[in-house]
Amino acid sequence: MEFNITISFKDSYGINQQSFDKAVDIINRKDSCTILSTSGPAIFIDEKESIPKPKENITFKATVSKPIELKELLVDVDNDFNELDLEYSIENYLKLVKLEFKGELPNIDVINNILNKNRNLGTTILDDSSVYFEEKDRRYISFSFSLVCSSENNEKLLNEILSEIKNLNYQFDVYIIQ
């Protein structure tokens, strides 16, 4: 299976040419990855001078035999990028899904187990934006995750996950963010 993945860096968090080059090196060191392109502004021109700016995007091809390998690769890349202290987003390979529960809230571990299960169609990556909130009269929980599968299996994988959660009789809303 081949996935084209784009990593976009946010300039406001201090991406510079050296950091960008280190990020490219991280991708190049992965056996299953081939850099396809780098893009973004190379020069920023203001009224007085031209200032070199680093590129902002790396697009690469990841070749894996099953979706769980892609998940492991992306977690590995994320760990390596964390050492560089860069803010970035990963695009083009999956959908981001958000589940918001209402009424009786589910056991967090039960939902995490469903979301983290390796399936024939693919798997998921939980996003850091999952939230649990509880106050005196108000309780709220949401899970955000990305589907890691081939594009033709996106809908099937999501339906499989949602079906398992629906079988637990919880009420929730589903938002497809990408």
Image: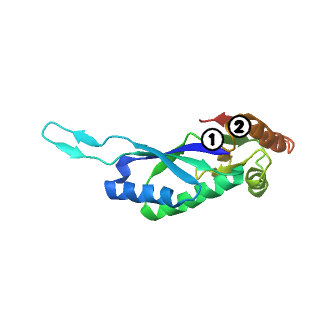
- Where does residue 64 sit, x and y in percent of width and height? 66, 51
139 displayed left or right of 38 = right
Residue type pointed to by label 2: Asn
Identified at 74% across, 50% down, the residue is: 115
Q: Residues within 10 Å of mark 1 (few under 14, many from 20)?
A: many
In the rendered image, is residue 150 in sight? Answer: yes
Image quadrant in which you'd find residue 49: top left
Name the mark on residue 33. none
Residue type pointed to by label 1: Leu
Relative to 97, say whether 32 is above or below.
below
Q: Which residue is mark 2?
A: 154
Identified at 32% across, 54% down, the residue is: 17
Callout 2: SS: helix
CA gap, disc 2 and disc 1: 7 Å
**Front residue of 147 and 30:** 30
Disc nearer the start of the sequence (2/1): 1
In the rendered image, is residue 133 in sight? Answer: no
Quick one: which residue is furthest to the bottom in this view? 83
- Where does residue 134 sit, x and y in percent of width and height? 66, 52
Q: Are marks 2 and 1 in contact (CB under 8 Å)?
A: yes
Identified at 79% across, 49% down, the residue is: 119
Name the mark on residue 94. 1
- Where does residue 94 sit, x and y in percent of width and height? 62, 41
